[in-house]
Amino acid sequence: MNPAVIRLLQSIRGFPAVSILLPTHRVSPDNRQDPIRLKNLISEAADRLLAEASRPLAHAVVGRLEGLASEIDFRYTWNGLALFANPDFGARYDLPFSPEGRVAVGDTFAIRDLVFAFNRTPRYRALVLSEKPTSLYKGSAEGLIEVLSHGFPMSHEGPGGSAPLPGGPGINKAAYADEMHRRFFRQVDAALSQIQSEDPLPIVAIGIDRYQAFFQEVTKNDYWIVGRVYGSHDRKPSHEIARLAWPLVEKHMRGERRKILAGLEEAVGKRQQVSGLVEVWRAGQEGRGELLIVEEGYRQPARADATGLSLTLQDDPTGVDVIDDAVDELIQSVLAKSGKVVFVEDGALRAHQRIALVLRY
């Protein structure tokens, strides 16, 4: 799962687009019920489709969902599953977080939980600096997995590393070794830069003072480093690395949210924001949204008028022409128009009716 997947799912439009989200379990006996829960959600999707679409369309989409489900080995799932299907497309993704189990049927896929995961920035990287080797991990609050691409893990094979230092008169071995360390960590940083360019994430740098100093001297990724852990940890397993790094990521996230809420209040003073789903919807559809701020648990069924600009809130998400979750639709619209989306804790936007939009103009 990466931002390219989000963009792909955002680009697919047309009714009926079915999304199934399911929390799963990594260990027995909890995971024994996961296949049954998924089967029940697919049955719910089938009932919805038969009521809202033609029988051939319904059967085509349900067939895709059942095909995706048949390929799942529930012994090796993560914390959640996402299935997306329409008559021409089907995809299944393992999720590193536990979504709320639900079915959504609409003109677009319900990617709210995926967008939430990325914009809340629970994902991060941990760079463990060492000569033998420097390792890179990626993950979230749920844990880390090691990156095995772009040259990682990366060992110092040159002089002063695996190879001996040159000898002879006039050679300052200490200075030469230091320069070889700088060269090695430049290679590390170049590989890290390529990864960050594809999927920028906050980074926690871990290592002894000496390696931290070399890396800090040469890195072009200092902007992304949100914390440092000092000490020798290169032989620790991934769960121990996560235990060291995650508190620093959490601290960074709290600070970022405080900045966002402060920026919202500044926008209020300048009259550059709107609040409440009805007003935010209109501005978002008009392409005026620079930053959408949403409470984590806010979902709302609604019906849009023929223009697509006016919204009427509804209680029943299964009503005729009712959007299951207008908040999810709005998120996708804002992102499609080059806006940004950030989630905050429930209650943080009480004065804004749970949702606010900072405007471009």
Image (cartoon, rainbow, N blue to C red):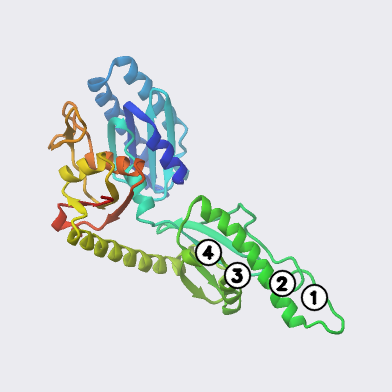
Q: Which residue is under mark 1?
A: 165
Residue 49 position, x and y percent, is 27, 23
Amino acid type, callout 3:
Val
Q: Amino acid at mark 4?
A: Asn
61 lies above or below 175: above
Looking at the rendered structure, which numbered label has been put on residue 180?
A: 2
Q: Residues within 10 Å of mark 3 (few under 14, many from 20)?
A: some
Front: mark 3 or 1: 3
In the foreground, 278 or 195: 278
Q: Select label 1 or label 4 by which is in front.
A: 4
- The one nearer the camera, 38 or 339, is 339
Give yes or no for contact between labels 2 and 1 (Cβ–Cβ under 8 Å): yes
Relative height, residue 110 to residue 212 (above, below): above
Q: CA distance from mark 3 to mark 1?
A: 21 Å
User: What label does residue 218 carry, if any?
Assistant: 3
How many C-alpha atoms fall within 10 Å of the one at disc 1: few (<14), some, or many (≥20)?
some
Three-letter amino acid code at the position of disc 2: Met
* Residue hosting label 4: 221
Q: Is residue 222 left or right of residue 332?
A: right
Question: Could you tell me which residue is drawn at 18 percent across and 59 percent down?
Answer: 268
Kind of element beneath mark 4: loop
Disc 4 versus disc 2: distance between alpha carbons? Answer: 20 Å
Between the C-alphas of marks 1 and 4, the distance is 29 Å
> Relative to residue 323, is residue 230 drawn left or right?
right
Q: Is residue 190 above or below residue 58?
A: below
| Residue in the foreground of this view, choosing between 182 and 251 | 182
Whichever of callouts 2 and 1 sits on the residue coming sooner in the sequence is 1
Mark toward the start of the polypeptide (3 vs 1): 1
Q: CA distance from mark 4 to mark 3?
A: 9 Å
**Going from the N terminus, do you reach mark 1 or mark 4 first?**
1
Tag 3 near tag 1, CB within 8 Å = no
Q: Secondary structure at mark 1?
A: loop
